Amino acid sequence: MKKTMLLAHRGFSGEYPENSPLAFQMAVEKTDADGFESDVHITKDGELVIFHDASVERTSNGTGWIKDYTYDEMLALDIGAWKSPEFAGQHIWTFDQLLDFCDETHMLLNMELKNYEVFYEGLEQRVIDAICAHKMQDRVFVSSFNHISMQHFKELCPDIETGLLYDKPFLDIDKYIERSNADNMHPRYMLLQYQPELVDLYHGRGMKVNTWTVNDEENMRDMLNRGVDCIISNYPD
């Protein structure tokens, strides 16, 4: 039986502040995760930063859009206290810092390009450059809900695997993926329950099936039985 990969969604985000250094560290220390899923944006002054939303208010003590913040302004935000007062004092990492951490801990990384609420010019090439500078083309794969971005990414760098994120059923998905150069599919897990034939369809095209965000044992076992290649979870323990 093949091994299904396990990724900690935004780090160990079920118990710790998402996308914080602590959440990534605890995923390594307290779980058997193979790696992380995380998210990247570009600041006003051009720094690649790790954060989920395009705006900062949900998971920090700030307000507004990341695109309007400098890196130093982003770094000054507290990204832990919203989860619990005990996590106050957590601050963002850059993409380079997360890549360094993955290298040090031998973890894989699925990096989501967050370019569909804000369209960051040149994000694809910037991410490629960072991955290649760290020589981690075989340890990092990317995904996005922006499928045009993924098409462009693969054209720029055939060596890094891409995946198409989606959370609603597609009409004629078999025809849709024929037009794509993506390596993998990243459906929300219940879509595989709604259309059980999808796993075989994707595998028949040589694509991996990496599904998210699977947070309870019943659905985890179901995904394993369906033969998915990767489970992304807030609770990797």
Image (cartoon, grey):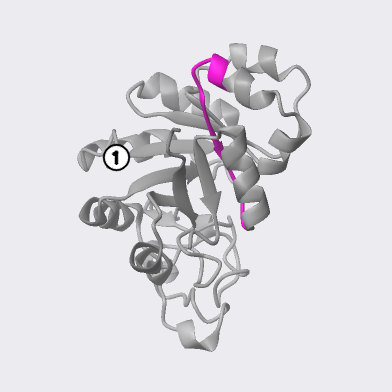
Three-letter amino acid code at the position of disc 1: Ile
Q: Position of residue 15 (x, y in %)?
A: 53, 72
Q: Secondary structure at mark 1?
A: helix
Crowdedness near tag 1: few (<14), some (14–19) or many (≥20) residues, C-alpha within 10 Å: many
Q: Position of residue 28 (x, y in %)?
A: 34, 62
Asked if the stretch drawn in magenta spans residue 204, the answer is yes
The image quarter containing residue 89 is bottom left
Residue for point 38% across, 23% down? 156
Q: Nearer the viewer, residue 93 or 47?
A: 93
Q: Is residue 174 visible?
A: yes
The image quarter containing residue 65 is bottom right
- The N terminus lies in quadrant: top left
Q: Nearer the viewer, residue 193 or 213?
A: 193
The image quarter containing residue 173 is top right
Q: Position of residue 162 (x, y in %)?
A: 46, 29
Residue for point 47% across, 64% down? 12
Q: Which residues are magenta?
A: 203-215
Q: Is residue 145 visible?
A: no
With respect to residue 41, does 130 lie above or below? above
In the image, is 74 to the left or to the right of 194? left
Asked if the stretch drawn in magenta spans residue 1, the answer is no
Q: Position of residue 95 (x, y in %)?
A: 35, 52
In the image, is 156 to the left or to the right of 79? left
Residue for point 39% across, 57% down? 32
Residue for point 29% across, 40% down? 131
On the image, numbered disc 1 is attached to which residue? 131
Query: In the image as oriented, which residue stretches furthest toward the front?
Result: 1
